Amino acid sequence: MLERGFRWLCASAVWLPIALLAVLLTDVVVEGVGRLDWAFITSFPSRKPEQAGVWPALVGSVYLVSLTALIALPIGVGAAIYLEEYGERRLLGSIIEVNIANLAGVPSVIYGLLGLQLFARVLGMGRSLIAGALTMALLVSPIVIMAAREALRSVPQSVRETGVALGATRWQVIRQVVLPMALPGILTGAILAVARALGEAAPLLVLGALAFVSFVPDGLDAPFTVLPIQIFNWVSRPDQAFASNAAAAIVVLLLVLLVLNSLAIVLRDWSSRRRGDS
Amino acid sequence: MSVLRKLGVRPGSLVMAVTAALTAAPTLAGCSSSQGRENLDKLVAVDGSSTVYPISEAVAEEFQRRHAARVTIGVSGTGGGFKKFCAGETAITGASRPITAVEIAACERGGVEFIELPVAYDGIAVAVHPANDWARVMTVAELARLWEPGAQGKIVKWSQIRAGWPELDVHLFGPGVDSGTYDYFTQAVVGRAHASRGDFTSSENDHVLVQGVVNDRLGLGFFGYAYYAAHQDELALVQIDDGDAQNGAGPIAPSPATIADGSYSPLTRPVFIYVSVAAAKREAVADFVEFYLARGGQLATEVGYVPLPEPVYARARERFAARTTGSMFEGGALLGTPSVLSTLAGFAVDQPFEGGS
Amino acid sequence: MGARRPSSRRLVEHALELGLLACGLVTVLTTVGILYVLGSETAAFFAEVSFAEFFGARHWTPLFADPQFGIRPLIAGTFLTSAIAIAVALPLGLLAAIYLAEFASPGLRRVLKPTLEILAGIPTIVFGYFALVFLTPLLQRVVPGLAGFNALSPGIVMGIMIVPMIASLSEDAIRAVPRSLREAAWGLGAGEAQTIFRVVLPAAYSGIAASIVLAVSRAIGETMIVTIAAGQRPWLTLDPRVPIETMTAYIIQIALGDVPADTLAHRTIFAVGTTLFVLTFVTNLIAQRLTRRFREGGYE
């Protein structure tokens, strides 16, 4: 009897957070869906809540996250290749590994401080799109590196040995054989990094975000805003109408994340099926 | 994925194509250098007071409907706004108090000449939660006892402000030190600008302050009257008694009427925009300021402010047209209601100031 | 085997390897960058403010006339919200881990685990919105004297957010305990709950402890939930019903305001940032040690 009670207790411990998640999502959707329409997505922020929209924030998010991926992917994959293919028994390799483990645990707001001081001030980029992208790239690199390493590790050693035996150089083996096989895993890592970058507000707030951005960023040095910051602005206003706007913007953000994560799952499935064949 | 392979597309190249397209977009949009210069020309950078922000926001919205300029508005606070303004980073800065001597010197050092333009009246409202039925009238002396530097850590319960009030904690909300509202309030209430206790919820974002009091039965906060007006169903006003029968005896609550005639004392003040002469050379900035002075009064009413008398606006327009520089307020030395308001009255020579004396 | 290759080929190979090394070194440079940025500004800060004041003073009022630089109120704020978060996440996470490891069928586990992971993937701004707009008004009906900004609401929400972390890592640790241990216990007549609490959990201790310490680190570093819902009032208290301010929220507050750079007031964000960094670094280090012990097998 006690056993049954204990089992039930454990089960409820799993279901309680899930139930709260459902409540949270329901609340947000109910609050926001009424506000969500094409006009909301394509309008600019306004003092009148019913006219306000997320367009600059949405475009800013897309630009920022694309730039972040463009910077973080080559660096992250490069680092992963080095660690897996070249650096296994070397001192530099272990130093890099330790660094990645530590960086993954640093609060995102600290990256904001780094970006503020290094990119915005010392390098003179100011509160611009490129400064934001560089900061976010540093934040998500550990994710890319860890996922890429997993992907590279999943490529059987025999493949590499065959390549070398056929006379190819290390790099040729990597580029023409290993990387294509690891690509789905790498893409999964890219998508996870992008999803993370999309949801972050803290480092960008530290870097500097404008309260009223009425245009779409038009260059790397332009000021910008992103969806999470727009949500933050609206949540900070006590009007109930702005709370609805915030909820609607959250729905937009969650939908984009849902699409991205589903893509990652599809890719993961496809890659494991592919590995099953070879 | 097999579909893509049938089309002869390899995933790698697809990824590259997509990323190329996504990154080409921003660079194409702002591509050539001439386009960049044009964009810079049409950029009107506004910053400064969170009190002036709603007016500037309304003006900017209407302005951008009619003109091809782009207006950005930051909310760094009056002090923070001046720092950027005197460094040449912004074209226009909003201020809820006159510029101080220190800031005038900073502008001189930065080579920035400014044009001082009043745009509206504002009252600083002291508000509590509707369930707070004891603190609906306060004297300036009581406010001082609550907010002065010595109160930090000591005056923490309502009963310490006035005997007979409940033995409950008081949770204070107020603007941060970069705020002109903060400067004006401390000068008017405590007697010295920038002098207050530090253990309260401070935010440059007045919305956060309103949110704080609306949700806290034990809260008391001060912020611009417009922010109260936007939430009057969720807040209760504290009537202020300044002990001076000359400008209205007894406790007075802020309202468009009492603000306009100066009887809501000492917490009524004009708010300003300061325009950089150098920036005003650009058509976009000049157009924006002229639009501000033409429509600002009406838009101010829409967002809960009290417009200045029309002759004052007319004089402000003349002042801008003549690009007259310098401040009327002796570097902030005249901070404190009666002298600020009467100086403004003297500004509009044709129209004597009603009320206040 | 060495097939002879032209030296140009070898040069290219070498250059590529160096290029890849450079990519790896970016992470090292990031760490160096963080340490340098935090360190230099913090050193400049402590040139003007004594350690005694920073750690001893009871008020944090760096921007006001007569500024005081005691970090205790901020640490108290961080501690309060984190403690509430762990108080929520620990029992829920541990019991959930036990359920997933011991009681759930493989099919159910395949569904429940990813669902819990969704919690971990939701942006924290959404949780912040939820804490302020939904949970605080709800709690105000139940908890007497709960202010609009308080430590309780964001603490609870943070706890829920952290549950997957504790659950997932603890589950791994529990499942790694060899079956033989359990069978020995059953053989001696122990019931399920007894076996779990007296035998399995102690055996899985390192892994579970690692997950808790990681969760603590996560809670300390959390920014958006507390910035939105906990308030901006540095206040040395253990009362979860009143407005407070955490270290992370303070950094955001100053960043959103406009304190000019190179002033003492601006440097406070780096001093606070360094404190935050040291705290999370130490907790992460402890977690790594515990994880290593778990991986090497802390049980017979």
Image: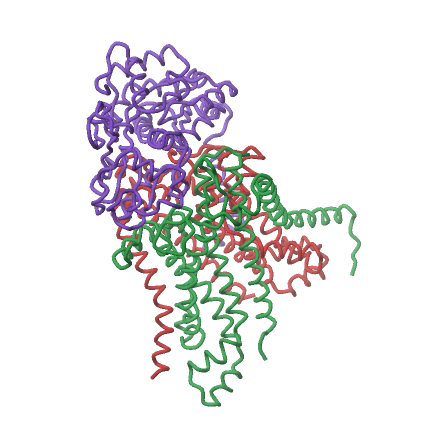
- Give the total of numbered labels: 0
Does A5 sit above or below residue C60?
below
- Residue A220 placement, left or right of B220: right
- Give coordinates of residue B346: x percent, y percent: 30, 13
- Give coordinates of residue B132: x percent, y percent: 23, 46
Q: Residue A130: in sight, yes or no?
A: no
Comparing B113 with C55, the one in front is: C55
Does B274 sit above or below residue B351?
below
Comparing A136 with C46, the one in front is: C46
Residue A114: quadrant of the picture: top right
Image colour for chain B is purple
- Residue A56 placement, left or right of A80: left
Residue lying farthest to the front in this orientation: B163
- Give coordinates of residue A101: x percent, y percent: 58, 57
Residue C89: quadrant of the picture: bottom left
Letter of the chain shown green in the rendering: C
Tell me which colouring the rendered structure shows.
by chain
- Give coordinates of residue B98: x percent, y percent: 38, 23
Please identify the quadrant where the N terminus of chain C is shown.
Answer: bottom right
Q: Residue C207: in sight, yes or no?
A: yes
Comparing A266 with B189, the one in front is: B189
Image colour for chain A is red
Please identify the quadrant where the C terminus of chain C is shown.
Answer: bottom right
- Residue A145 placement, left or right of A165: left
